[in-house]
Image (spheres, coloured by chain):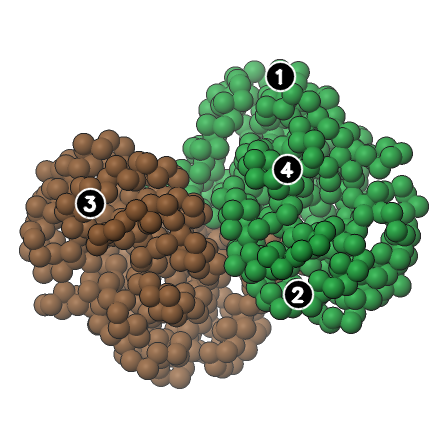
Chain colours: A green, B brown
Amino acid sequence: MKIESVDFFYLSMPEVLDIGDGSQDALLVRVRTNTGAEGWGECESSPLTSIAGWCTPMSHSACKPVSHSVLGKPVDEPSDIRRLTSEVRRNSFDLLQADHTFSGVEIALWDLLGRHLEQPAWKLLGWNRSFPKVAYASQLFGDTPEQTYQKAVGVRSKGFRAAKFGWGPFGINLAADEAQVRAAREGLGPHIELMVDAGTIWGEDVAQARLRVPVLEECRVTWLEEPFVSGALKAYRELGKGLTGKLRTAGGEGAHDPFVARNLMDFGGLGFVQIDAGRIGGLESAYSIARYAQAHDIRYVNHTFTTPLALSASLQPYAGLENSVYCEYPTEASAMARNLTTHSPVPDDDGMVRISDLPGLGMTLRKETLLKYLRTVEIRLSGKLIHQTASLD
Amino acid sequence: MKIESVDFFYLSMPEVLDIGDGSQDALLVRVRTNTGAEGWGECESSPLTSIAGWCTPMSHSACKPVSHSVLGKPVDEPSDIRRLTSEVRRNSFDLLQADHTFSGVEIALWDLLGRHLEQPAWKLLGWNRSFPKVAYASQLFGDTPEQTYQKAVGVRSKGFRAAKFGWGPFGINLAADEAQVRAAREGLGPHIELMVDAGTIWGEDVAQARLRVPVLEECRVTWLEEPFVSGALKAYRELGKGLTGKLRTAGGEGAHDPFVARNLMDFGGLGFVQIDAGRIGGLESAYSIARYAQAHDIRYVNHTFTTPLALSASLQPYAGLENSVYCEYPTEASAMARNLTTHSPVPDDDGMVRISDLPGLGMTLRKETLLKYLRTVEIRLSGKLIHQTASLD
């Protein structure tokens, strides 16, 4: 089969709010072959910018649009997709956005190949079996400790075994942060695992992070996520060295290629590496990190905050890792994200998510949702049309 | 003064060839204030993709277009520009291309402020004086050793004190590479410094790089540039450890934020850190790396491969570093790049480039060149025009 078309569909809620909810828009990718095979993926990135990374003209030999490396290429077996990854990295390495653009394309290719070969994507990647994951309810802190407490009570009532709170007001004021973390623990009760996401609020300021360690340990928090930006390796290393109890650092969602994630593991002393397959270059790049984490006794966690399609994609790379047990599970997604697919991976009564055995990513899109939230894109260069949103038919 | 408009101008040669010449297109940025002040900068990046990073709608609170943090903001003193850098990093950290987009905007702001305050940009950044730099002729290897030899002879005849050869056929075949490096040395004669740029050809394969070390040492090469991709810290470190003679590694041009460059210094054992101000976030980010390099006894080198405007910008961040003496000087730029400005920093009879004392970047654009090579851009979202190239008036 040859890759005949790659089409991008930019979906958005009618109004996008200035909050940390990443499910307010989405960039879906449809790949089709000359034989009529089809697959869907999703980029976790700025939609219009990623589309431009697909259709922009070449600037020079190492700054080609992603389309250059993909269109017309064969896709008959997993090695074909792996080869495309190398090609894109070589041909587009001066095009910063290329990793984000390609991620959705690559995911769609695994979906396509899985459907064609009637295998789930995780099997094609190389796993023999899949292990169920502990879904952790992933949500924003409330504006007040009382709101956070109520959210935590809600999580407990829904049967989750773990919950993460993050962003919102967290990270600015120590006393307020302590109240927030204690409210979360109180609302969850003693048995549900608690994670905290600082959303890079402290930049590279290790002292700010250290001030929060006592309350995080007191509330038996499993990990402190993104105390610093992904590049701040020295800060990660310094904070990690001082953690002698159960608490560990988590990070990596910002990794736009495998090196960023590997450096956080090699030099930053991470306990948990969190990978967004829709940013790092797709499933193969994420899978390489899952294997790397396994070899270095670090736990892999998916990062996802958008649609059920992205959630399913995010589970494939570490399906076969028995001791990487946590799964980020968005509980506050937008109506658009919630209604994108006919079904979604759902935690069972034990709070576990089972990874689908269906071919590809195992998801079916609702065309009416795509039509409802679609934003068409048209780009002209010197008057000439170089990109136009394709038909959904 | 308030930032009233930021306009992007995408210039391109009529035909862009599939070669490593980065001067075949350019993305210029013009910033104007409500008081009529004006400045110009340049992004070293994919033009259309970077424009999209400016005008795309917000996806969520940490994925805003660069325009969100810039338009309407005050620009009266250097601290205003520094504040914008932090704002963009916080508001756009999930928008990968944002660093490339902002770089040109930030450079234009220093040019604007310098003109307004009648100071060169390097003084506003914090340097008291500027030191002349040794211009090294930066060029591609010839297709054959004979061509490389002729290029080297040409460099010598032009009075350069140093020359770098890179890309082209280098890195694939050991014997061919040895012949290329020896041809370069022979053509330069014994007194001109020689640098070699591997253009990341070996990915993270340390063994491939090591195979070339003997010929590089034999030919007294000053640095081996980008043996690996910017993220491959372990590979850089391993190669660097084995270099016991004069030869050192150089890298960092791919750094799209200061952390990438700092990690290469902290963990990768670089001897020379090469920064493209048009990628790393602009002059302030580059200046922070110049200071960091100075404190860690590492030499800073500008990276530039496009226009005289970009060359002038690239010199500002390390103007005051006396012992960071090398300056990348493109000698094979396109007609568009060569004719963009009324003059260019030119090496004197001693092969030294003096950094301009004129206000801002000290450059004057040729409007006829902009008009000649301009590609207009028009972007529509759901039919609504969200971006259109501004008038050059």
Spatial CA distance of label 1 from label 2 is 51 Å
Can you tell which of label 2 and label 3 is closer to the viewer? 2
Residue shown at 52% from the left, 41% from the top = A258
Q: Residue B100: x percent and y percent?
A: 46, 56
Q: Residue at x 48, y 58 (%)?
A: B259
Of labels 4 and 3, the one closer to you = 3
Q: Answer few, some or many: residues within 10 Å of disc 1's Cα (few below 14, many 20 plus, some between 14 and 19).
A: some
Q: Chain of mark 2?
A: A
State which mark lies toward you, 1 or 3. Answer: 3
Residue that numbered label 2 is attached to: A210
Residue B93, quarter of picture: bottom right
Q: Which residue in the rendered view is the most extreme toward the right?
A: A157
- Please report contact status of discs 1 and 3: CB closer than 8 Å, yes or no: no
Residue count near mark 4 (Cα–Cα under 10 Å), binned few <14, some 14–19, many ≥20: many
Q: Which residue is mark 4?
A: A42
First-in-chain label (4 vs 2) = 4
Q: Is residue B261 visible?
A: no
The dot on residue A116 is 1
- The three-letter amino acid code for the residue at tag 3 is Leu
Q: Nearer the viewer, mark 1 or mark 2?
A: 2
Horizontal arrangement in the rendering, residue B313 relative to residue B92 (left or right): left
Q: Identify the residue under disc 3.
A: B216
| Residue under the point 71% across and 62% down | A213
- Alpha carbon distance from label 1 to label 3: 50 Å
Mark 4 vs mark 2, foreground winner is 2
* Residue type marked 1: His
Q: Amino acid at mark 2?
A: Arg
Whether residue B51 is situated above or below residue A37 in the rendered picture: below
Closer to the camera in the image, A104 or A389: A104
As shown in the figure, which amino acid type bears the numbered disc 4?
Glu
At mark 3, the secondary structure is: helix
